[in-house]
Image (cartoon, rainbow, N blue to C red):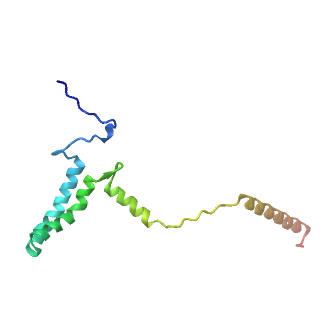
Amino acid sequence: MAHYVQIPKNLNDIKEKFLMGLTKRQAVCFAVGLVLGAPVFFVARNYVGMSTAIIAMGIVAAPAILCGLYRKNGVFLEKQAKFMREYFTRPRRRYYKTTNIFMAVERQIEYTKIKKKLRDAERKGGYS
């Protein structure tokens, strides 16, 4: 019997597994989540109880873990958050101002006429 394995058409989506089926990025993000969440759990369980300490640990560790797991359209969570922050902090109204080239040319012609009059008047010895 022949066994067939499906090969994805886009080979860029294939990531090398590093540890227990996780990529390096996912393993690092889980480790950061563990480093942030474990102390919160051990400190909080003495004061607020076991279930509340677990919830606090989850809240503290969730951003780091989500950064490793969440990916949409090839963009990870932290980049999407950066793009969203840039979008929401930019000004809402952007005014498009055009430069009227014809008015600029007209002003330049007017300027040269006045300059020529002044030069002519200066040559004659006085302003008129």
Q: Quadrant of the N terminus?
A: top left
Above/below status of 51 relative to 26 = below
Q: Quadrant of the C terminus?
A: bottom right
Q: Residue at x 20, y 50 (%)?
A: 27
In the image shown, does 86 or 66 lie closer to the viewer? Answer: 66
Q: Residue at x 43, y 67 (%)?
A: 89
Extreme residue in the right direction: 124
Q: Residue at x 43, y 62 (%)?
A: 87
Residue 73 image point, x, y percent: 36, 49
In the image shown, does 87 or 116 lie closer to the viewer? Answer: 87
Residue 53's image quarter? bottom left
Residue 98 image point, x, y percent: 65, 61
Above/below status of 71 relative to 96 = above
Image mark count: 0
Residue 82's image quarter? bottom left
Residue 127 image point, x, y percent: 88, 73
Query: Image check: 124 left or right of 14?
Result: right
Q: Residue at x 88, y 65 (%)?
A: 120
Extreme residue in the top direction: 1
Residue 34 image point, x, y percent: 16, 59
Extreme residue in the bottom direction: 47
Above/below status of 92 relative to 15 = below
